[in-house]
Structure formats: structure tokens, C-alpha cells
Image: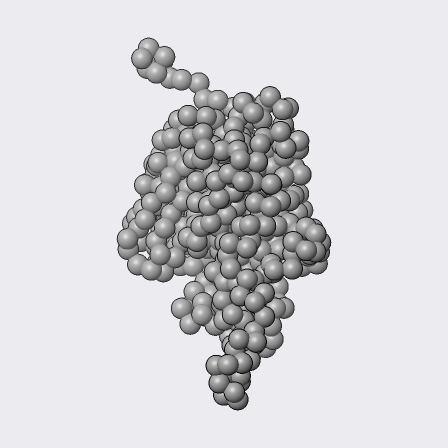
Amino acid sequence: MSRVAITGIGAVTPLGNDAPTTWQALAEGRSGVGPLRTFDASTMPVRIAGQVRDFAPDTAGPARERRHLSRAALFAAAAAREALRDAGEWEATGPYRRGVAVAGTVGRPELQELVDMSHQLESSGCRDLYRQAPVDVLRRNQNLGTRAVAGAAGARGPMLSLSTACAGAAHAIGEAYRAIQDGDAALMVAGGFDALTTWMDVVGFSLLGALTDRWNDRPERASRPFDADRSGFVLGEGAVFAVLEGWDTAVARGARIHAELVGYGSTLNAYRITDSPPDGGGAIAAMRDALAESGLGPDGIDYVVAHGTSTPGNDLSETVAIKEVFREHAHDLLVSSPKSMTGHLTSAAAGVNLVAALGAIREGVVPPTVNLDHPDPRLDLDYVPNRARARQVRAALVNAFAFGGTNACFVVRAPGHEPQPSPAQEES
């Protein structure tokens, strides 16, 4: 199968409106969590989120291409365009050899839209509902964001639009990897976008008991993966996209290669809708599959970019899974969670994890897990508490686990770092 290079990365996150700014904040351990600004949350039990600030819509493309896009889809278009610029002169790859794999938000009406519809029904019946602008329906369509990404790339090849919640971006990146490996495309733009920071999302996740409500007065302290005082996750928003292409094509055109994507695994827990299984469940199998395909043994991974949501169950389950997969090497790993700084970007979350992995490989710095002040005695791995750590990262494993029990993991390694075969492999 074809080798796959990552040649471009773009991001719009609570930490910054491009990938370099996002990486710098991750490396410095700065939080992007603050008061909710998308609606009046003053009477809500949860009044904080990781939100994008000072976003310029024109970075998402010309006005005529933006007019039907939702807030989240605008983030997607901007991040994809940045990734394509970062990839350099990729246009020689024909349009039918370019594709996209996009994990998108679940579109739904805003509260005010529902109120307006209710008033219309009460006053004049269903007839007036047809006065709703068609653009309102389009803005809630996940595929409009995917189309915007494809348009930025001039892509007419494979188009995958995925909806696997918090594992979405990892699935999109993994399936783009497969498309290139299998020869279905020469270049893929892959990632995810989301903005679950509306009234309805905050109410829904609050009713599930998934969000922390203890830190409204100190939002930067709220997301606490692996800490004994963790009490739920923090909603976030944004988009991250990468450009993937065949290794030989990237080398031939002189592209800067951020990393090589070398392994991917995807499984289902079949446990509960929201909870992670205490024994690690399908996460173990997904990590093992990604490692097996990479050709790296457990000691070939230096950094695990954790899903690390800051919920009691997930962080315990992920720790159990990592220890089961890496065994005696588990305590030599560095493990950290970008969600401690961004909140949970749901469909885009694994994209932020990729930014962390690429930065660690490039600069030899592993971002911290901030707010890890009170170690949980059950969680005994090295989670890089509060300050970044200098470490050569030859290869990193990226984890993503989602509601519904779906798991996706992938492995990236430094360009030019190829493990030497063991004597037994050489003899065979």
C-alpha cells in the first residue's frame, strides 16, 4: 500500500485562528476556555465554553461561497484553506484525484428559530412556516461544510461526510488515509468541524450530567483531565483540517512533510451510549490495530495524545486501555490532553490532537495537561502536568473516543524516522 504524508495543517480553535497560534498556546499551556458568548447564559448552570474569538469570516472564502455556511462550517472552510496553503503547490494533482473526508457538526435549529416557529404556528398555522428562508435549512446541513472544503481544494474525487461525534475527525483522517493507500485518491483534505455552543447543546449536555458546573467563576480551571477533582467536560468549538497525500507525490514536488501517517484503527465498544467501559473496551483494540499497522512496537511510541475529556469515567477507561496496550512501556510514555486547554471540540477534537502531535514531533516539546493539580491515585501515568516537557517524539498515537461507543486511533511518525527491522525480520 502507498505511504501517506501529512503536508498541510490548518486550524480555527479557542486557542487561535490558525494552526501555528493554536500550537503555540498548547505548548505554553494557555487555556482558551472562558464565558459563553453565543447566547445569554446568565441563568444556566453552565456558563463557560472554549469558543473561537475574533474570527474573520472572509478567511473562509469569497462572500458568495460563504452565504449559506453556518458558524461551524465557516470555521471548516477557513481551516481547510489554511491547510491547503500550508501544503504548498499541490494543484498539479488533478481534481478527480483529490478528495475530502469531513466530520461535521449535527445541524439543529437555534432556540430563537424554534420560538419564532412556535409563534407562527399559534398565530396563523402551518402556512406561514413556508416563509422561512431556504438558507436557514441549508445552514443546518452538514454537507454544506463538506462542500466548502471540497470547493477550496477543487476536489472532484472521493467525498466522505462523517458523523461519529467526538471520534469524527479521527475517522475522517483515517478514512482519507485509506483512500490514498488504496489508490482511490492522490490527495485528501481531512478533518472535522463543530460548534456545539448553543443554548440547546448546553442544556442537553447539562441534563446528561456530562458538563462541569463547578468552575463558572474560573473557566480556565474547568477542564481537568486526569485530575482527582474532574467533574465533567467543557464544550468547545472550531475546526482542524490536514492535507494528506501519497508519499512519493509529496517528495517529488518538494513538499514539506510534517509527518507520515502510518497506522489507523477503528472499533465499537457496544457498551453504553455515553459511558466508556471501565475495562478499556474497544479502545484497546483500536490502539492495537493502529500500532500493528504502523509496524511500531509499544516502545516505538513516545507520546499518546489522549482523548482525555475530564469526565470521571473516560479518563479512567482511557488510562486502563493505555496500560493494557503498552504494558511495561506505559509508564515511559508521555500522555497529555489538549482538551484541558480547548475544551471538547467534539467532531473536531481529534484534529486538535493532531496539531499537538505534529508540533511535538517537529519541536521536541510535548504540551501539558493543565489543571492537573490533584493526582487521582487510580491514574498513574505521566500526564505531563501543567508544564510542557522537552522530549524527542519519534512517533505519536492519537486517540479519539465518542458517544455511542465508537473509537478511532491513528499513529503519526517523524518524517525520515523509519524503525529498523529486528534480526528475526531480516532473516525472514
Where residue 211 appears, as percent x and y from the top left, is: 47, 65
The residue drawn where x is 49% and y is 66% is 108
In the image, is residue 205 above or below residue 280? below
Asked where in the image residue 293 lies, by quadrant, the reply is top left
Q: In this view of the protein, can residue 303 be seen by the observer? A: no
Image x and y of residue 428, in percent: 31, 13
Return the x and y of residue 7 as percentages of the image width and height.
59, 33
Using the image, determine if residue 9 lies above or below residue 52. Answer: above
Q: Is residue 134 left or right of residue 55?
A: left
Q: Position of residue 273 (x, y in %)?
A: 33, 60
Q: Is residue 80 left or right of residue 167?
A: right
Q: What's the residue at 68%, 55% (across, down)?
A: 64
Image quadrant in which you'd find residue 252 = top right
For the point 58% across and 47% down, the residue is: 149
Residue drawn at the location 45% of the way across and 67% of the way down: 205
Question: From this viewpoint, is residue 161 visible?
Answer: yes
Answer above or below: position of 246 versus 345. above
Front-most of 58 and 305?
A: 58
Which residue occupies the extreme bottom position in the image? Answer: 123
Quadrant in which the N terminus is drawn? top left
400 in relation to 236, above or below: above
* Most distant residue in the top direction: 427
In this view, the residue in front, 318 or 119, is: 119
Left or right, residue 378 beside residue 148 = left
